[in-house]
Amino acid sequence: MGFGVHPYYERYVSSPPQEESPPLPRGHQVRLTDSRFKFIHPLLSCDVADKKDILEFQPLNELLQRHVQTEINGKQARKISVYYRGMTSGRWTGFQEEEIHPGGSLLKIPYLMAYYKLAEEHPEILNEMITYKGDFDESAGQKIRPAKMIEKGKSYSIADLIHRMIVYSGNNATVLLMHRLDRTYLNHIFDDLHIPSDRNVHRQWLVTAKTFAYLFRILYNGTYLSQAMSEKALGLLSQADFKEGLVAGVPQSIPVAHKFGEFTEQYSDGTIVSTNLHDCGIVYHPSHPYFLCIMTEGQSQESLKGVIARLSKQVYQFVDGPLYPPVPVGGGASELL
């Protein structure tokens, strides 16, 4: 099993010379329009721009820097990383987007993708039952407790465990899934997608906001999982019950497919050394859907929730307001199909 970039060969045929089309603007993307899907928008082709080249997003970049500095000066957080990307335009910007953070529960997204990839060839695996014997409790250390916990002595289908892992971020459900999945298969997912799988001394997955965005882009574009499974995955992520981060910054009517992650480092006596809280996902703005990842580190998880919510609100207001730059016109998927 492999995922790579293959050469694209054009077939040349005799034809009258045609006027050369003007080059597409950088960051331009061509997508398939299909009313069957609510959460994905399959990608046909794209051209990638560097952040420094996307001058029209300079106001957003300045807004992010200003508000991040306000939060840090107010001691609401020690470190903040932000990555923004327009999902249909490919244009992006960020602040400290390549700063490395311990991912916490963000690691559950690769597990979700691994199981759905496996289910494409073996759909029966989602119906397989696993019994929780109660011989571990990894949810005990979660600061954001799952609303619904698996119970000792009960059996759950893998599909149900995946639901609990994503919607409630249940660690016990995740551990059962981890034990069932061949570690080699998960490594294949990281290798296929060229995602680093480095860990720190606490066995935490180390990830940047920009790198983590790649997983959501793959789901939105429907380029690794099948389109049906990509839609299923984002639909599940849109049900996540954590509402105090990205979701708190957008109108209630706007769907958000997202995942939060938390990690607290503390001494044996319980004294907190540092707290990490992240929330990353796709905000389905009706005209300009975008990915936003906000990673934070500080002392208080409640303060970090507020930081993420306020930054999310600032970004949404920018996207929804008059300063948002128009999407370059370069032809749509419907014209090519």
Image (spheres, rainbow, N blue to C red):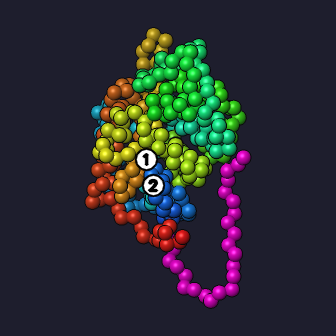
Whether 90 is drawn above or below 11: the answer is above
| Magenta-colored stretch includes residue 302 | no
Q: Residue at x 30, y 54 (%)?
A: 320
| Magenta-colored stretch includes residue 8 | yes
> Dot 2, how many residues are within 10 Å of its Cα: few (below 14), some (14-19), or many (20+)?
many
User: Which residue reaches farthest bottom?
Assistant: 16
Tags 1 and 2 touching, CB below 8 Å? yes
- Give the residues drawn in magenta, as a range: 1-26
Locate residue 11: give its quadrant: bottom right
Q: Residue at x 47, y 22 (%)?
A: 149
Dominant SS of magenta comes to loop
Q: Residue at x 45, y 55 (%)?
A: 87
Whether 69 is drawn above or below 22: the answer is above
Circle 2: residue type: Met
Q: Which residue in the protein does label 2 denote?
A: 87
Circle 1: residue type: Ile
Query: Horizontally, is 17 left or right of 291 in the view?
Result: right
Locate residue 27, reporting x and y percent: 48, 62
User: Which residue reaches farthest top?
Assistant: 269
- Quadrant of the image for the C terminus? bottom right
Locate residue 81, reporting x and y percent: 43, 41
First in sequence, mark 1 or 2: give its number.
Answer: 2
